[in-house]
Amino acid sequence: MKKKLKTKKAVAKRFRITKTGKVMFGHQYGSHLKLHKSKRRLRRQKEPGVLTGVFAKKIKKMMAKA
């Protein structure tokens, strides 16, 4: 009998998978020492990023979605 994969909780907290199967993540360093960072950089960090390729495949496997 095939064993079910458990979700890696550390990964589940940092990434989410959309209905279309894209892996989304929040950018790091956005809420710490903001004064010396440019406004443009802080704005870009608010937007979620999209993972592609091998990394996305690995994250999906860790989330037990693959």
Image (cartoon, rainbow, N blue to C red):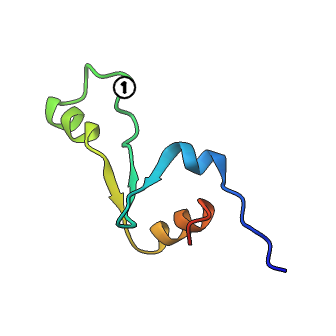
Give coordinates of residue 59: x percent, y percent.
53, 62
Residue situated furthest right in the rendering: 1
In the rendered view of the protein, which quadrant contains the C terminus?
Answer: bottom right
Q: Observer-nearest residue: 35 or 60?
A: 60
Q: Observer-nearest residue: 38 or 16?
A: 16
Residue 41 horizontal side relative to residue 2, left or right? left
Residue situated furthest front in the rendering: 1
Residue 55 horizontal side relative to residue 18, left or right? right
Which residue is disc 1 drawn over?
31
Q: Tell me if residue 59 comes above or below residue 1 in the rendering.
A: above
Residue 36 horizontal side relative to residue 3, left or right? left
Q: Observer-nearest residue: 20 or 9?
A: 20
Give coordinates of residue 54: x percent, y percent.
47, 74
Residue for point 50% across, 45% down: 14
Q: Tell me if residue 47 comes above or below residue 50 in the rendering.
A: above
Q: Tell me if residue 39 comes above or below residue 23 in the rendering.
A: above
